[in-house]
Image: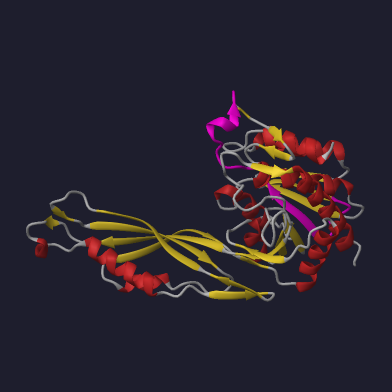
Amino acid sequence: MTVRGLARQLVSIPSHDDPTAAESAITEWLQSETDAVVERTEAGVIARRDGGGRCALVGHHDVVPPADEQTDDGAYVVSERGDRLYGRGSADMKGSLAAALCAFRDADSPCTIASFRGEERGGVGARRAIDAGFAPDYAVVVEGSTGYSATGVTDVAIAHKGRRASTIHAHGAAAHASEPESGTNAVYRAADAIDVLQELSPPESGVLGHDLRGRLCVAEIEGGSAWNVVPDSCTITVDERTVPGERADIGRVTEIDGVEWDVEQDLPPMACDDDAFAQAVLDAATEAQTGTPALVTKPHATDAGWLAQAGTTCVVCGAAEPGEAHTDDESVSLPVLERCYRLYRDLLSQIEGGD
């Protein structure tokens, strides 16, 4: 089966609520197209050829919910216009997953491929796999890296930011608004907490000569019950983009009376810790295209963060372009999928060949 044919098949399978059908298709394809040892668990699908080697290609097959126009009678709508494949999950990331699966099949070396579930829910599958012992020396996470240095060029991301989602709870005491001094205004305490957040300097980090700067943003605020009542509670949600190393000291808000801080989600950043591996992937990317790829950074989290945190040396390299994922008209370039296939196949042979 070609990369194009496999991509069309995978994109057509609904996997936003239940990844079972997609996992079955991937498992059956691996069993029919390769001689790999295929393992299917609650983490997803992991396949190893000739012992698995040192390098893994890593993707995911779950997707975000589709728009109405992306479904038809329960199935996902798949179409081609020009040289692009359209459909939910085409960019994020079943297109690159198809390229990786075909490269795994055709590589002339020991290798591993993994497709996890639950990436869109905070890396559930990757974390389960890591807890069960999944620990390749190197991994190429096949999320999007095309179009970062120049339009149409498939780059190699050596770092990405993480995301920490926090909730700040401010507590007070209710009173009639005509006598505000008899209560304690939780909104005022929340405002004091926001002042603290605005004073924080998000950390910066350097990765193989590239700089990443964290970001901090108050995303929501909710408090009060009526126009004539002093509010006794107020909640702030904070979106923080983290970098490898130190975090912003959000905990300072708890120095304010009546203020608590809870972390709801903490997706780790990723930093490649091996310049030689990054260069090897960049060399493979250079050979696979006419453009000149570069080492770049990504602004958002992927499963590479969990793998790197567990000790795997990672990069991110895939077909999707900025702004394509999760859109109502999601698509991926078919020629770039073929490019990624060559890149992954040749890289596996190079890494496992000891070059």
**Could you tell whether 229 is left or right of 157 in the image?**
left
Quarter of the figure that contains the N terminus? top right
Image position, residue 219 (x, y; %):
40, 57
**In this rendering, does residue 260 appear at all?**
yes
Asked whether residue 2 is drawn in magenta, I would say no
Coloring scheme of the render? secondary structure
Q: Quadrant of residue 274?
A: bottom right
**In this rendering, does residue 136 appear at all?**
no
Image position, residue 334 (x, y; %):
76, 43
Above or below — where is 116 with respect to 158? above
Quarter of the figure that contains the C terminus? bottom right
**Could you tell whether 224 is left or right of 168 in the image?**
left
Q: Which residues are magenta?
A: 49-73
Between 155 and 203, the residue placed more toward the observer is 155
**Residue at x 79% of width, y 38% of height:** 4
Between 249 and 290, the residue placed more toward the observer is 290
Image position, residue 76 (x, y; %):
63, 31
Q: Quadrant of residue 167?
A: bottom left
